[in-house]
Image: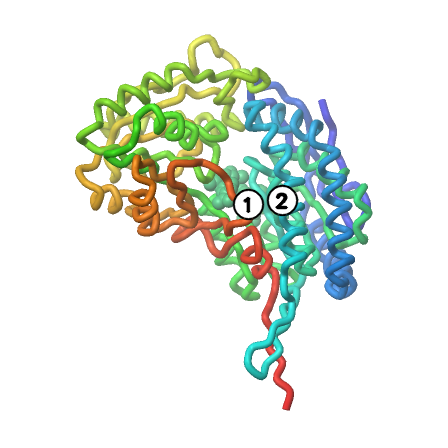
Amino acid sequence: MQHIDKIYLNGEFVTPHGEEYFTLYNPATEEAIGRVRLADEVDAERAIAAAKAAFPGWSKTRKAERIEVLQRMHNAVVACEDALLDAIVTEYGAPKVRGRWMAQYPADVIAQAIETLENFEFVEQAGHAQVIMTPVGVAGLITPWNSNAGFICNKLATAMAAGCTAVIKPSEMSAIQTQIITEALHKANIPAGVFNIITGRGEVVGDVINHHPDIAKISFTGSTAVGKHIVASSAQSLKRVTLELGGKSPTIILDDADVAQSVPLVLAAGFMNSGQACVAGTRILVPRSRQTEFERAIVEAISTIQTGDPRDEKTEIGPMVSQKQWQRVQDYIRLGIEEGATLLAGGEGRPCGLEKGWFIKPTLFCGHNQMRIAREEIFGPVLVLIPYDDEAEALAIANDTHYGLSALVLSGDHQRGIRLAQQIESGRVMVNTLAHEPKAPFGGFKQSGLGREMGKWGMQAYLEAKAIMAG
Ligand code: NAD
């Protein structure tokens, strides 16, 4: 059992004022693996005060000084990759191959922030005006459990590059990963108060951040429901808000797509991160003329997917993060059956031979786009195949959603795929690839978010433009 009983305030590990303990579980075995003492409202107030006190100094640092500090952060985070991988697999159940990517991502995004800062122009001329990009103030950074360390590092490095100081409220379910990252960041010798990390409940610590007049900006990654709550509760002080929220992303298979090339991409997109990915391609749009062929090929490929022990290199789908998430996914599978969708693979209950652990059978339905299983984010390995008659209908179905985070187009004709991509209402559209591009802006249309992270777009979100006109 790991006991985590400190938060990080003003450059030091300190005992929180909060006295509540939260139990951490290994989702593959259901065993309790740790306890974390949670921060409360008093701790949140202290963290905000520390970040506020550090802001005048940090916001005046020069680009070269910030790069030096970020470089130290990068080195420290690179050094904790193996410990992080172990924590990601144990605490969250990410399959090892995916977990390795997730353990490298925190250092990668710090490197990206350094590159952005190196190329960023803080002062520009606009006619007679000099435009100065000015750090917005103290940023409240709130992360989810499904890539906690990566989101902490991305948000923090970008905020610091812009000259902001930060209060970070990580997911309470990721306390072991948070501890590893916090220890690494501490070693980077960052000026006290520039970052503060307080693990606590969203409705306690999060709500102090949402309302506090000394928080100028919130960057949140998590569910659309909590994102809406943050917008409403931060409106009183008109905080700048960046939201990275949920999705129900379409994978559009065009009628000229090759089955053998397409199916691995369809399933990699759909079952990414055991289905617990905001960008997962959970609606698979197939041309009716080739429906049987694709259905067969996808069902056959699902039957070969290994679900189980995330430490096994061959495992592609690990457990759901919690019992609650397992139950939620089970409820959606039942709902799909009740809604009249055809169950093509998987279904209710645990996969054969797995009595312990929050495992789900990789599940494929065939249905239509008005079903709740095709409209709501399930956040598990549950996909819906939706037949369409022509390309216009495929586009209409793809865009008929409240979300707009990501999309995948599969076509034998690259240019045709790109033409369709241009018409999809989504922050990212991939054509015949799942390759990630960290230099490109990341974020959602519609209810998938507000604003963008990554690159200069992400950096601008921590800055105010000030125009100075001199006579
Ligand atoms: P969640 O919204 O339940 O929680 C996210 C964070 O918000 C946690 O730290 C939580 O404690 C905190 N929170 C909860 N209530 C709060 C409140 N009232 N005020 C402030 N903070 C509060 O999400 P989750 O279950 O941790 O993560 C899964 C969700 O995140 C999914 O919907 C997924 O699509 C989304 N997500 C989006 C992206 C993206 O980049 N768009 C990436 C990963 C995950």
Q: Horizontally, is 189 left or right of 315 in the view?
A: right
Residue 222 shows up from this direction: no
Say which quadrant the C terminus sits in: bottom right
Residue 377 shows up from this direction: yes
Residue 364 point in image, percent of width and height = 33, 24
Q: Residue at x 73, y 40 (%)?
A: 182
Q: Amino acid at mark 2?
A: Val
Q: Which residue is mark 1?
A: 438
Label 1 Cα crowd, 10 Å radius (few <14 / some 14-19 / many 20+):
some
Q: Which residue is mark 2?
A: 109
Residue 294 point in image, percent of width and height = 27, 25
Q: Amino acid at mark 1?
A: Pro
**Residue 305 image label:** none
Say which quadrant the N terminus sits in: top right
Q: Pick whichever, 6 or 345, lies toward us.
A: 345
Instruction: Name which quarter of the figure residue 126 lies in.
Output: bottom right
Say what secondary structure mark 2 lies in.
helix
Label 2 Cα crowd, 10 Å radius (few <14 / some 14-19 / many 20+):
many
Residue 339 point in image, percent of width and height = 25, 30
Residue 318 point in image, percent of width and height = 51, 22
Q: Residue at x 82, y 47 (%)?
A: 189
Mark 2 touches mark 1? (CB < 8 Å): yes
In the figure, 239 relative to 443: above or below? below
Mark 2–mark 1 Cα distance, whole angstroms, equals: 8 Å
Instruction: Name which quarter of the figure residue 138 lies in.
Output: bottom right
Q: Horizontally, is 163 left or right of 290 in the view?
A: right
Q: Earlier in the sequence, mark 2 or mark 1?
A: 2
Q: Pick whichever, 5 or 377, lies toward us.
A: 377
Say what secondary structure mark 1 lies in.
loop
Q: Residue at x 40, y 17 (%)?
A: 349
Q: Pick whichever, 16 or 412, lies toward us.
A: 412
What number of labels is visible? Answer: 2
